Image: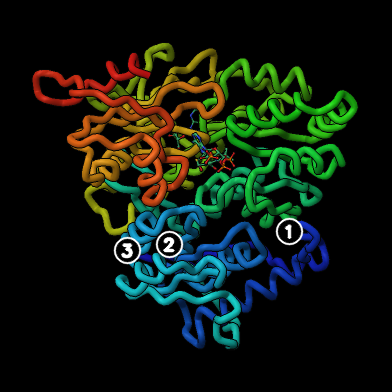
């Protein structure tokens, strides 16, 4: 049921010549971004009134075109489906088919024979932004609050990644609540080096900054030297990253000679905000960063299905090892394994959330959508306690979810792919703790015919994103199983 119309994005045009995006030597004003957005809207609609929730996928690196697409597709009534530029053809095929995509926008340079085959099989047309037809942009673009706006893929405890549908309302709520809570300013300048197929990079950085009229410095990938050079020049006022990136930055800063080190750490010290999230920030990392830069991380907790749910205060005490309190408009409770509310703060319980920022559904997957909620509360799978008024995440309910470098991975998905190898007869994947990556993907295998670890890695790299490929391998004659024949995964940890 659709309700009254809803507006999406403040006027970009009104911000005029202010800088919206910087891509190395080039920058683009809000006015120019507005024109690009209008071209995308007009070209996609090509005289139609609305895209009516057409899932428009795109495979663009961090670029002016990416920004125009993510704002334009939604404004035209479509659902933006940003895909990973590092995904394998198999992974892209899954995303395109689950979301029922018919048009994929990508630069010519990213077309590959494998992707051509996938698109031919699925009936997906490939075209670049420049190839969109020249058409007039309709004057009115009415949107509804419940209308789909964004699909982001997330791993779960069953099968392959699911397509999380956010609405115009939930994306807008994610953006406006963070602008308010973290005090975004139009004078802010933030670097964006996180992948643009996840909420952290898309919403917390790109869309929050553009909604508020701030400037975003685009980086195709994280490059510690390049980031530190800009930080030393005092370019940025806000910095957001996953813990792995802060570990890498500390390692890089330590390689610099003394004066350079001081310039970089002072560059961080002068910023108004350093945020850590997407994975737990270990207390020693929090303390080391504070020692180096005087910045106390604002650690927050979020999820693809929810946007941000808990946050340490922007003004107030930020406690290491804690993720703060519910953001405005977010209701949180904790439940036990039978779904009963836990009232005692010190008793661990699964976080259950109700929020305006919550997703609408998993596209085309009613069963998973229904299972994800209990009485309207979204069940996160994360276990937490409340410690003197601040939430502390203890871990996850399922051993089959791994967080590595800030990416959420499904052990079952990685196992299913490895089992396709003709020499593999049994496999079990787990995450093992790691100082740099949070967790590393580790796998134990039973082979029915000898094959080298190197050739397995090469084989896996063709089929999955690099961050999913196991980093630790253990070959065995049999996997440990319980009386029911289920692999006893916790016992595998001793092998790694
Ligand atoms: C890459 N490598 C890894 C991993 N990833 N090794 C072990 N574990 C991994 N997870 C290896 C590569 O294979 C390569 O090795 C070498 O590291 C460098 O690869 P590269 O891709 O260049 O790595 P990087 O650029 O250093 O990547 C690290 C990264 C990246 C920048 C931290 O992992 C990243 O962007 N993470 C952020 C993910 C994110 O945004 N998550 C948000 C989702 P070799 O040379 O041998 O091949 S969560 C979310 O959105 C919710 C809502 C939230 O709360 O925020
Ligand atoms: P994703 O589905 O990729 O959005 O990842 C969401 C998951 O990341 C959550 O369910 C948590 O397990 C984890 N996560 C995000 N932020 C934090 C944090 N600050 N501390 C601990 N875990 C976090």
The CA span between labels 1 and 2 is 29 Å
Q: Is residue 12 above or below residue 85?
A: below
Q: Closer to the N terminus: mark 3 or mark 1?
A: 1
Q: Closer to the N terminus: mark 3 or mark 2?
A: 3
**Whether residue 176 can be seen here:** yes
**Measuring 68% from the left and 57% from the top, which residue is drawn there?**
210
Query: What is the total number of numbered labels drawn onto the structure image?
Result: 3
Quarter of the figure with the N terminus: bottom left
**Whether residue 375 can be seen here:** no
Residue 427 percent across, percent down from the top left: 24, 33
Q: Secondary structure at mark 1?
A: strand
Residue 101 percent across, percent down from the top left: 38, 68
Residue to which mark 3 is pinned: 97
Q: Nearer the viewer, residue 143 or 223?
A: 223
Left or right of 262: which side holds 62? left
Residue 23: image tag: 1
Instruction: Specify the farthest residue to the right.
Output: 259
Residue to which mark 2 is pinned: 148
């Amino acid at each position: 049921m659709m309700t009254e119309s809803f507006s999406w994005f403040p006027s970009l045009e009104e911000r005029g010549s202010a800088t919206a995006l910087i891509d190395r030597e080039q920058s683009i004003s809000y006015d120019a971004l507005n024109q690009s957005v209008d071209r995308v809207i007009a070209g996609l609609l090509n005289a139609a009134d609305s895209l009516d929730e057409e899932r428009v996928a795109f495979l663009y690196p961090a670029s002016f075109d990416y920004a125009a697409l993510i704002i334009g597709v939604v404004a035209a009534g479509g659902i933006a489906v940003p895909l990973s530029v590092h995904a394998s053809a198999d992974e892209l095929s899954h995303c395109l088919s689950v979301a029922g995509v018919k048009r994929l926008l990508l630069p010519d340079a990213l077309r590959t024979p494998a992707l051509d085959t996938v698109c031919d099989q699925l009936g997906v047309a490939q075209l670049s932004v420049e190839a969109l037809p020249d058409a007039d942009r309709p004057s009115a673009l009415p949107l509804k609050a419940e209308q789909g706006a964004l699909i982001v893929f997330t791993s779960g405890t069953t099968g392959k990644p699911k397509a999380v549908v956010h609405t115009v309302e939930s994306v807008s709520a994610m953006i406006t609540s963070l602008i308010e809570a973290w005090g975004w300013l139009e004078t802010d300048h933030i670097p964006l080096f996180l992948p643009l197929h996840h909420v952290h990079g898309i919403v917390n950085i790109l869309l929050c900054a553009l909604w508020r009229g701030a400037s975003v410095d685009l980086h195709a990938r994280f490059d510690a030297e390049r980031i530190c050079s800009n930080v030393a020049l005092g370019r940025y006022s806000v910095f957001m990253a996953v813990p792995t990136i802060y570990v890498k930055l500390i390692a890089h800063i330590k390689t610099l000679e003394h004066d350079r080190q001081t310039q970089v750490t002072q560059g961080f010290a002068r910023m108004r905000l350093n945020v850590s999230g997407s994975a737990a920030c270990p207390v020693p990392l929090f303390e080391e960063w504070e020692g180096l830069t005087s910045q106390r991380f604002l650690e927050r907790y979020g999820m693809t299905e929810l946007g941000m749910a808990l946050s340490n205060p922007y003004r107030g005490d930020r406690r290491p090892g804690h993720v703060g309190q519910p953001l405005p408009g977010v209701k949180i409770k904790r439940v036990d394994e039978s779904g009963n509310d836990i009232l005692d703060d010190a008793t661990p319980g699964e976080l259950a959330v109700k929020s305006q920022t919550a997703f609408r559904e998993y596209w085309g997957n009613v069963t998973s959508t229904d299972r994800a909620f209990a009485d309207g509360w979204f069940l996160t799978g994360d276990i937490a306690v409340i410690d003197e008024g601040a939430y502390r995440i203890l871990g996850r309910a399922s051993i089959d979810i791994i967080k590595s470098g800030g990416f959420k991975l499904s052990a079952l998905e990685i196992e299913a792919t490895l089992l396709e190898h003709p020499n593999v007869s049994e496999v079990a994947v787990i995450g093992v703790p790691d100082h740099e990556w949070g967790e590393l993907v580790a796998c134990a295998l039973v082979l029915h015919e000898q094959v080298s670890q190197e050739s397995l890695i090469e084989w896996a790299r063709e089929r999955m994103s690099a961050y999913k490929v196991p980093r630790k391998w253990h070959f065995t004659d049999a996997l440990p199983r319980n009386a029911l024949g289920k692999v006893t995964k916790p016992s595998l940890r001793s092998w790694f």
